[in-house]
């Protein structure tokens, strides 16, 4: 059961959908509009749903400052390296290559072709962790 989802709009929504499919997302719904635009779509990966549509205004994506845009999506996976490789192979920009963290998990970060930040990590938000000595 999905209890929440994220919605994103892109200048090139069909390209964003293709990138998500390369990561392993399945398209559940797709409603196309005029000129190849996407009115609404829903993509699912495990228990994560992302709704993607075409921009209906000139939205700005936050710029990368250091290792973050300050706004991003986090996907929990035990296959951080594989997810990272698929993302980069499909056109993502590397921000942080796969690495171990001080709290004994693994992570990697990319910008998708639309400039949005995605982090892949083995850490499960909401669970307890402690810093290793």
Image (cartoon, rainbow, N blue to C red):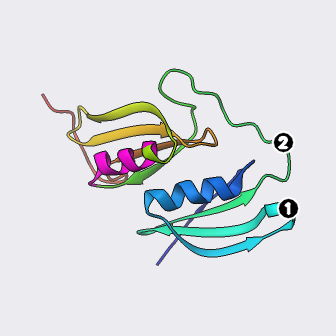
Q: Is residue 102 left or right of residue 62?
A: left
Residue 20 vs residue 69, the one in the foreground = 20
- Place of residue 98 in the rendered image (x, y in percent of width and height, measured from the top left): 31, 37
Residue 118 vs residue 126, the one in the foreground = 118
Residue 17 vs residue 61, the one in the foreground = 17
Q: Is residue 133 magenta?
A: no
Q: Can you name the residue that lies furthest to the top here?
A: 66
Predominant secondary structure, magenta span: helix
SS label for mark 2: loop
Q: What's the residue at 30%, 53% (across, down)?
A: 127
Give the quadrant of residue 27: bottom right
User: Residue 35 got which mark?
Assistant: 1
Report the magenta residues as a range: 78-88
Q: Is residue 70 visible?
A: yes
Q: Is residue 85 magenta?
A: yes
The residue labelled by disc 2 is: 58
Question: Which label's residue is closer to the chain start, 2 or 1?
Answer: 1
Give the quadrant of residue 59: top right
Q: Is residue 103 above or below residue 51?
A: above
Q: What's the residue at 60%, 59% (across, down)?
A: 17
């Amino acid at each position: 059961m999905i209890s929440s989802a994220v919605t994103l709009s892109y200048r090139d929504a069909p390209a964003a959908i293709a990138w998500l499919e390369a990561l392993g997302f399945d398209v559940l719904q797709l409603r196309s509009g005029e000129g190849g635009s996407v009115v609404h779509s829903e993509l699912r990966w495990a228990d994560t749903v992302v709704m993607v549509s075409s921009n209906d205004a000139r939205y700005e994506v936050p710029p990368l400052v250091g290792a973050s845009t300050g706004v991003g999506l986090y996907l929990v996976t035990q296959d951080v390296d594989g997810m990272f490789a698929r993302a980069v192979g499909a056109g993502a920009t590397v921000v942080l290559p796969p690495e171990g963290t001080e709290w004994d998990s693994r992570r990697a970060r990319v910008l998708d072709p639309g400039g949005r930040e995605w982090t892949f990590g083995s850490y499960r938000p909401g669970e307890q962790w402690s810093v290793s000595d």
